[in-house]
Amino acid sequence: MPRRPVSASLPDFPWDTLASAKARALAHPDGIVDLSVGTPVDPVAPLIREALAAVADVSGYPTTHGTTALREAVATSLARRYGITGVDPHAVLPAIGTKELIAWLPRLLGLTADDLVVIPELAYPTYEVGALLAGARMLRADGLTRVGPETPALIFVNSPSNPTGRVLPVEHLRKVVAYARERGAIVASDECYLGLTWEGEAVSILDNRVCGGDFTNLLAVHSLSKTSNLASYRAGFVTGDPALIAELLEVRKHAGMMMPFPVQSAMAAACADDEHENEQRARYRGRRAVLLAALREAGFTIDHSEAGLYLWATRGEQCRDTVGWFADRGILVAPGEFYGPGGARHVRIALTASDERISAGVSRLST
């Protein structure tokens, strides 16, 4: 029987479909303003780079579980920054970027074709990819009553959301936890934008108001890519239920999924320092303010977008038409259809460009 490549079960990589729009934007006399991908453009803080360089001569294998210093720094930072108390440093597991963790989580948990993975209706594409890699079934559902009588094995939650910037209130998250506990399901909460909330309050699935201090079957996924500009370092982690973390650790040890030791050192330094994070948050807040005002002036409606690094915008037309409108002005944005059928009339506009490029984009929106 012919071999069927794993890639055959996966959708086309969304950003590959932006080639023509990117070419149009690149043709602008003043160059492209690329707001399509949330990749950091600002420098890594010196204290983080110094921590990385200080251990660059360590030649031995790192541990999959991470150093004690790293795990303690993570647990302390969660309590200090977000009020997440009760995290046992032993139940912190570094990940080689949270995209990797999310993509492989259903497989690492042993899910199969018999299992159902529930993802948000508008969702980061990697949730779907994770289900496909495990061979599991997938359902888009924000309201869990839509799941029907079947019991999901895994429920992905994302607040603040990518792409919409929507923040789920405590009451909603509490209902998700109650629903999952009644059925023995695991909840994986992608909280990579928790530290970038602009309006209202975003809370973790591990917040005492949500889970009552009981982390059973709960996983919180965090990244330093956005808040500390460490996308190139692939610095993320997962924490929550100690039993689930121990299960993930055991599988990852066998698979060699270990974060490089210098990155562990850099990550510990980043978690121990809030000043660089506050400075970066201020940069994004300023970029958001000017871009938000310019988009509204240009006739766009901005939905949700209370947090995160994106503005979820619409002109009431098909998203690819809007992408073309931006491309004609030398601006590249992401079509909402990347994130699910519900995004067909929106575009996602990233705040991750330099102040100079944001200013250039703002001036073009009035033309």
Image (tube, grey):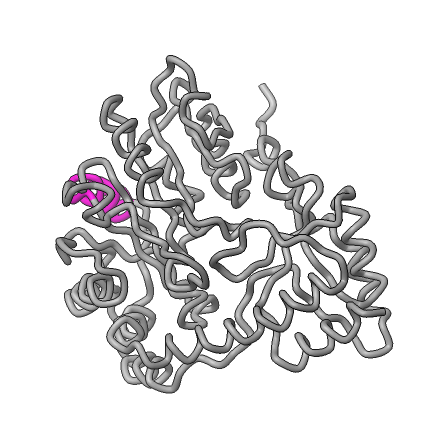
* 273 shown above or below 298: below
Residue sitting at 33 percent across and 40 percent down? Answer: 173
Image point (64%, 41%), residue name: 343
Residue 359: percent from left, percent from top:
69, 78
Q: Quadrant of the N terminus?
A: top right
Image quadrant in which the C terminus is located: bottom right
Residue closer to the observer: 255 or 182 = 182
Image: 355 above or below 313: below
Residue 175 quadrant: top left
Closer to us: 278 or 154: 278
Q: Position of residue 27 (x, y in %)?
A: 86, 69
- As drawn, 243 above or below 347: above
Q: Position of residue 366 (x, y in %)?
A: 81, 69
The image quarter in which residue 75 lies: bottom left
Which SS does the magenta portion mostly show? helix
Membership of 243 in magenta stretch: yes
Q: Position of residue 267 (x, y in %)?
A: 31, 70
Q: On the rendered structure, is 338 left or right of 328?
A: left
Q: Is residue 145 magenta?
A: no
33 vs 293, nearest the viewer: 293
Q: Nearer the viewer, residue 85 or 260?
A: 85
Q: Tell whether 131 sits left or right of 64.
A: right
Q: Residue at x 53, y 70 (%)?
A: 40
Q: How many marks?
A: 0
State the extent of the magenta-drawn residues as a range: 241-254
Q: Residue at x 52, y 45 (%)?
A: 124
Q: Is residue 236 left or right of residue 129?
A: left
Name the image quarter holding residue 286: bottom right
